[in-house]
Amino acid sequence: MTTASASNPPTPTPPTAPLTRSEQFITAAVFLFPALALTVPDGYSIGAVALLIAAITHLVINRRTWVQHPPLPGAVKAVIAFMIIYALFWMGDAALRGEGVREFDRPSRFLLAAFCLSVFARARIRQAALWLGLAVGGIGTGGLAVWQKLIEGHSRASGFAQTIQFGNAAMLIGLMCLAGLIWAVSQPTTRRGRAFAIVILILGGIGGLTGSFLSGSRGAWLALGPALLLGGWAATQLGYTRRYLVLAPIVLTALIATVYLQPATGVAHRITSATQQLEHYIDGTDRTTSVGYRLDMWKGAWRLFESKPLTGWGERGYIERTRELGSSGYIAAGAGRFTHAHNEWFNTLAKKGVIGGGILLGLYLTPAVCFVRSRRRASAYASRSVNTPSLAIATAGLLFTFGFLATGLTQVNFNHNIGAMTFAFTMAVLVGLSTGAARQSTTNGTPRRRRRRIWAKPIDGRRYSRRARLPRIKARRDTQRPHRGDDDATQRIVTDRPEQKRAKNRPQ
């Protein structure tokens, strides 16, 4: 008995079996991470620690069967690789420049997230935990923002985090809640259960967007641009393109009108002030504004990049050279006191050069490719109930990736702990779930049958192979059908039936 168990070790748990205790622990951590991220002090750290402990526990419990799991898809390996490369390059660069262990802190988060992703991609996690956690987080974020802004009278809602980071994260939570509606409407539960899921995700989406608008973080609102495009992509996948093109402008107009026309939100004041500050910067009357400082910081960062394009200046070198640019008058003196460029790309190019910029690009693009590929893999199966969970995760992942990229145009998210941890661990959860959704589709779905390709040869001699053109061909053939016995009678050949072709070609 001992010999048999040693020669035939236990196989991994099939996808249809109930979750193990360690997988239940991971599922609970996936719920806690978005639910606590902005609603309690240091919530993003608590959720990340829970994810890390759950991943370690699952790996230890399944250490004997770990080698029997199938290899990870190439796209997932690329995401893990770029997380590791980013962390090692940033820490190695800081060590070589003598910037101290302090600069190891934020990049090290990506090493931990890469480990979690390698575990989550092989585990079975319930998607409902993510959507419920996002909904709870969105509702809590919106309620906290309303309390701080409208009841306590703060000028801008900030929750328990830095104001801009709070607004950015709240926007992304709200958008991902709306992506969860794709999952909610297709769940094979009772009508009451589907209604509950839809309502709570809508409330989470409204809460997240409300928190972002009340924070006054104008850079977070840039995420609405890619969100509209990705919403159209998801609608096309579901076959609702026309409905989306009609409803999306209406909903967007109503949203903008609501937040802009309400003075209590402060959105109108923020937009008006940004416009005035840009005008003052252009005509040179005032460069010491929020917009003016940002434009000067971008100008100075590009100047530093041009002087050292390959490897950049590093953290300390950037701070020293930026102060010199401020003292010389090339940029405003106030802009020279900031430690980063308030733009992810300018900041990376100035500090890490082209090499760092390429790594950052890979850090954004590889997850996007992974989400698209997992969606294509699942779309090879005809069951809509199998397709929609993978589409929901892919849409949420793309919204988070490009939304995070958009918010980074006016802020360096990776220079803050909340930004680095939110991106790294959220990406680990989303990529892991997308891999699991694609794997479940291939296990439970039915392969889509190839359509018969029908070739029709009407009277005019033209050949048509597209199935959509057949009704038109048949109608024209019926109106122009010659009398029986005519040599030019219309022929219809079905090419995917080889027995008919052989019978026709057989000599009489």
Image (tube, rainbow, N blue to C red):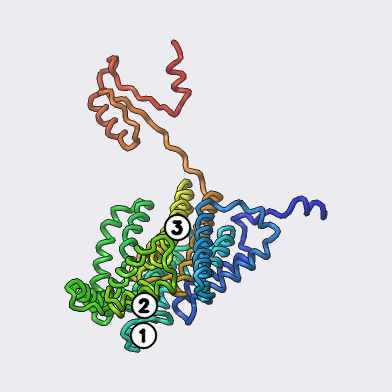
Give the x, y percent position of residue 447: 50, 44
Q: Depth-wise, is mark 2 or mark 1 nearer the camera?
A: 2
Give the x, y percent position of residue 349: 39, 64
Q: CA distance from mark 3 to mark 2?
A: 27 Å
Q: What is the three-letter code of the residue carrying label 3?
A: Gly
Q: What is the three-letter code of the residue carrying label 2?
A: Phe
Q: Relative to residue 450, is residue 329 drawn left or right?
A: left
At x 43% / y 16%, what residue is drawn?
Answer: 505
Provide the residue designation for mark 1.
148
User: Can you see residue 186?
Assistant: no
Residue 365 appears in which quarter of the rendering? Answer: bottom left
Image quadrant occupied by the C terminus: top left
- The residue lying toward the viewer, choosing from 390 and 503, is 390
Give the x, y percent position of residue 289: 26, 79
Provide the residue designation for mark 3.
362
Image quadrant occupied by the N terminus: bottom right
Secondary structure state at the residue bearing disc 1: helix
Provide the residue designation for mark 2.
338
Crowding around mark 2 (Cα neighbors within 10 Å: few <14, some 14 to 19, many 20+) is some
Give the x, y percent position of residue 324: 34, 76
Relative to 233, say whether 199 is above or below.
below
User: Can you see residue 300?
Assistant: yes
Marks 3 & 1, CB-CB < 8 Å contact: no
Residue 198 appears in which quarter of the rendering? Answer: bottom left
Crowding around mark 1 (Cα neighbors within 10 Å: few <14, some 14 to 19, many 20+) is some
Q: Depth-wise, is mark 3 or mark 2 nearer the camera?
A: 2
Q: CA distance from mark 3 to mark 1?
A: 38 Å
Secondary structure state at the residue bearing disc 2: loop
At x 82% / y 52%, what residue is drawn?
Answer: 3
Secondary structure state at the residue bearing disc 3: helix
- The residue lying toward the viewer, choosing from 401 and 310, is 310
Q: Earlier in the sequence, mark 3 or mark 1?
A: 1
